[in-house]
Amino acid sequence: MLSRPKSMVAWVARVLATLSLGVAVAVSGSISALAQNVPVVRDAEIEALVRDYAGPIFKAAGLANDGIDIVLVNDQSFNAFVTGRRLFINTGALMEAETPNEIIGVIAHEAGHIAGGHQQKLRDQLERAKTMAIIATLLGAGAMVAGATTNSRGLAGAGVGVAAGGGEMAQRSILAYQRTEEMTADRSAITYLNATGQSGMGMLKTFQRFQTALSLSGAQVDPYRISHPMPRDRISNLEVLVKQSPYLDKVDAPALQLRHDMMRVKIAVYMEGQAAASRLMRKMQGSLAAQYGEAQSAYLFGNIATALAKTNALIKAQPGNAYFQELRGDILMKANKPKEAADAYAKAVSLDKARSGLLPVSLGQALMATGTPDALKKAVVQINNGLRRDKENSVGYRYLAQAYGELGDIPGAELATAEGHFYSGNYKDAKIFAMRAQQQLKRGEPRWIRAQDIINYKPSGKV
């Protein structure tokens, strides 16, 4: 039996590594499980904003009913990619983009990949490329054997050349295909932006950012050895289309820009540190976004009383903002005032138009911290409400298990623990806890059936 050459395996790995800037071909089954390999970030406010950016674009691309998840990645680089029915966006991209239009352009490009079926097409191209390279390797091996049996050094050397050349040809073939798909996704993005009455200037600014970064690096790049077109080529190809659009000079609505600024400040405070946050807030001095950043900085690094006063001022300015109430709840929890925190989280839940599953779980945590049996029962209700909206929130299941345990519902605690392991991708422990729960449940009841589903689950490893 012939085995695949080690060099071929290494080449495939290198090709797959190039996919992270646009299309990736496989990833673990749940969002929570992704955290094993991808640093996933969860935040109700940011998730809601990005979904608002994506909604009209997905509709224009015919993807509105396809259940596409948007996943935030804790990475400072300006990057986004798709895999399966998921769109991943780095917090670095959200932080660097000065306007909503820039991020909307990125989303439009990635929607082009999804709508164009580029992931499956890329899988097909990879299979063809591997076949090409394997055939070339076998031909080269045959030539080397013939050279050895005839004592012909020239023929044996030609065999090495055939094998190496075949791998190079396959690699260039797949990279050329990727570059074509990237250009196709760019053109599709302009179509979606026009259909939603939005400018393509944000896309151009993004590619100009890439071109500047490439120029500053001083790197000499072979355009035939990269998976994406050179930034200058993308700018040249898109500039005409963007400038032909009747929406060229369209700017983002002030209310949307404010939400974008508040998102950037939040990312800076929580992920970039005080220095980066201060630099950004100076640029927004006097704005509500800067005040939001000051309140968050006080909560994380300063005085609780100051943080609460600043947050109360924010709430007075925007009484209907769910996320200001969420921040107030966070501050009160840190101040060891769970009852008051629960009131703030309850207001956040009632004001949250996006119906995030994260906020009810926070409310449930605060109710649990009050320690009364009645509050524990309410906590179970709230956490379950959150998990119904966001079933892959593995952290939520841990709190649910704790609440059930304190109420004496041991099978409920075991099953919640099983769910937490399941959505974390830890299927072995999920099955163990599901079996423990099932032993204490009546056969055929809903919880027993769910435990059986976990026990029977066979992970495919890919989506």
Image (cartoon, rainbow, N blue to C red):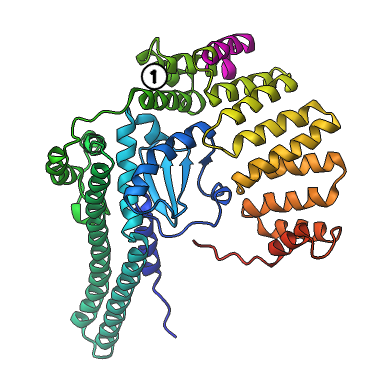
Q: Position of residue 167 (x, y in %)?
A: 28, 69
The amino acid type found where label 1 is placed reads Leu
Q: Residue at x 85, y 46 (%)?
A: 409
Residue positioned 80% across, 49% down in the render: 412
Residue located beneath label 1 in the image: 280
Residue 388 left/right relative to 123: right
On the image, the x and y values in percent for residue 284 come to: 37, 15
Name which residue lies at 59% across and 9% down: 309
Mark 1: secondary structure = helix
- Which of the two residues, 57 or 290, is positioned nearer the viewer here? 57
Residue 201, given in percent of the width and then of the height, sits at 22, 35
The overriding secondary structure of the stretch rendered in magenta is helix
- The answer to whether residue 458 is seen in the rendering is yes
Q: Which residue lies at the image location 71% right of the left edge and 56% below the top edge?
A: 430
Q: Is 395 situated above or below 418?
A: above
Can residue 21 be seen here?
A: no
Residue 303: in magenta span = yes
Quarter of the picture containing the N terminus is bottom left
Give the class, few, some or many, for how many residues have Cα within 10 Å of label 1's Cα (few <14, many ≥20).
many
Q: Is residue 388 above or below residue 16?
A: above
Which residues, given as a range, are shown in magenta? 297-315
Q: Quick one: 340 or 178, which is closer to the camera?
A: 340
> In this view of the protein, which residue sits in the foreground, 159 or 172?
172
Judged left or right of residue 252, residue 211 is left
Compared to 152, does 165 lie above or below?
A: above
The answer to which quarter of the image holds residue 278 is top left
